[in-house]
Amino acid sequence: MTHPHSSRCEILRGARDALPVMFAVAPYAMVLGAQASQVGLSLVEVGAMTGLNFAGGSEFAAIKLWAAVPPMLTIVLITLLINSRHIVMGAALAPYLQHLPKRKVIPALFFMADEGWAISYADTLRRSSAQQQTAFSWPYYWGACLPFYPVWVGFALIGAAIGPALGNIEAYGFSMAFPAVFIVLLRGMWRGPRLACSWLISLLVAISVYLTVPGAWFVFAGVIAGMLFTYLRAIES
């Protein structure tokens, strides 16, 4: 059994590692909220969308589609495609979660947004490399993932509330926080050029599909390409 003091320290360690990224998440949550208010969503609707979905990429896509009033099925399918990356994220953590009961793991995965996952997974890889007894720290995961939820929902609501007064909030440069966060997260998981080949393959396929196929199929194509390349390389080795 994990000592309460040890668990508290691990939670705080996860929250400390997540804190710098939260400063970047807050601005583009405001961008999302502002865009949502400009297409007619109320504060309650913005809160429901961000609180129940909790996946920024698909929410941005849904807002852009909302402005064009597409069939609801289109929004659902695009959301499914963009959120398909969570399948890979969950699969990456799965080998380290075998010692935990599913009644604990499944509810916790709801809070597995990109940023929290990347921070927790990077810590898991570090602990595994150091040959610690348990590579995956359950309290650390909660400390790294859970704080993003109130930040995302709260700042999206702030953006929705002040968006009409600010006008085009993207003109303030807040949207640059989105790619900046992912560059930092990728840097934290860097293990050398050989292991990053899967990232490159995924990126090139996603760009090619984005330029040639309408819709959000580039997300799904990039995910599948990266997985397939990794699988084939594992077979060869």
Image (cartoon, grey):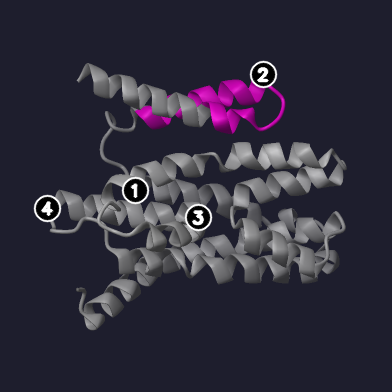
Residue at the disc numbered 1: 93
Neighbor class of circle 2 (other Cα within 10 Å; few <14, some 14-19, many 20+) is few
Look at the picture and state if 223 lies above or below 153.
Answer: above
Q: Name the secondary structure under disc 4.
A: loop
Q: Which mark is residue 113?
A: 3
Mark whose residue sits in front, 3 or 2: 3
Q: Are marks 3 and 2 in contact (CB under 8 Å)?
A: no
Q: Mainly helix, strand or loop, the magenta region?
A: helix
Disc on the earlier residue, 1 or 3 = 1
Q: Are marks 4 and 3 in contact (CB under 8 Å)?
A: no
> Which residue is labeled 2 in the image?
212
Q: Residue 95's x, y, as percent? A: 28, 45
Amino acid on which disc 2 is placed: Thr
Q: Amino acid at mark 3?
A: Ala
Q: Residue at x 51, y 66 (%)?
A: 148
* Residue 215 image position (x, y, % from top left): 70, 30
Which sits earlier in the primary sequence, circle 2 or circle 1? 1
Question: With respect to residue 159, does 213 lie above or below?
Answer: above
Quadrant of the drawing holding the N terminus: bottom left
Q: Closer to the camera: disc 2 or disc 1?
A: 1
Q: Quadrant of residue 193?
A: top left
Instruction: Tell me where the magenta segment starts and ends, as one range.
Output: 198-221
- In the displayed structure, does residue 117 sit left or right of residue 110? left
